[in-house]
Image (cartoon, rainbow, N blue to C red):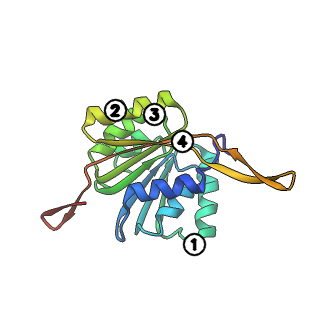
Amino acid sequence: MLSASPTKPEIIAITIAKLRLRPGDTFCDIGCGTGAVSIAASIFADTVYAIDIRDEAIGVAEQNFAAAGISDKVTLVHREASEAIVDMDIPAHIDCAFIGGTKNVESVLKGLCAKVRGRVVANAARIETTARIIGCMKSLGIFEEVIHVQVSKGYELAGETAFKPINPVYIVVGGTDRYRDGDTLIYQ
């Protein structure tokens, strides 16, 4: 069992929308955990790099990628993310990236800032972590918005429906929203 729970499907849907993935994109998932976000991104992206430092996460993600039939699209990188980015374990060009693991998030953002030509989306459960991500994105000149998402799921209670909340998540969006089409920049 991983120490952190997988990203919930409702949060993944918002995250994928904010990433603005397109066919042919190269996507990077930092702190991939179970691989749930990578699997969702693979519907759009042609190439996925999933990075995690935890042995257990790599094993679980590998199994989930095989079960989803996307192993041929995914390169699993078993390293600390800020080192993997700097040491070029991932390519020089990435269309968009998701940060689900927040260890060394400032170093990760700085490394991604030099490589991502589209959007960077980071999810965090804690307000202090969210504030650090926003501050770092602002200092890098890539901050766009932050969204606070609270999801509740219905369940039966005494023959009626009640709702149980799921922990809130902060989705922080940054990036240039520039994509290269030859030498022409296309702004979305």
In this view, the mark in front (4 or 1): 4
Residue pictured at 53% horizontal, 63% vertical: 39
59 up-or-down from 41: above or below: above
User: Mark 1 highlights which residue?
Assistant: 69
Q: How far apart are marks 2 and 4 (CA)?
A: 18 Å
Q: Distance between the residues labelled 1 and 2?
A: 36 Å
Sequence order check, earlier mark of 3 and 1? 1
Binning the other alpha carbons within 10 Å of mark 4 as few (below 14), some (14 to 19) or many (20 upward) gives many
Q: Which of 146 and 5 is in front in this view?
A: 146
User: Mark 2 highlights which residue?
Assistant: 136
Q: How many numbered circles are shown?
A: 4
- Element on which disc 2 rests: helix
Return the residue found at the far left.
183
How far across and how far down the image is residue 34, in percent? 60, 53
> Does the CB distance between marks 3 and 1 fall below 8 Å?
no
In this view, the mark in front (1 or 2): 2
Sequence order check, earlier mark of 3 and 4? 3
Q: Which amino acid type is shown beneath numbered disc 3?
A: Thr
User: Mark 3 highlights which residue?
Assistant: 130
How far across and how far down the image is residue 65, in percent? 58, 64
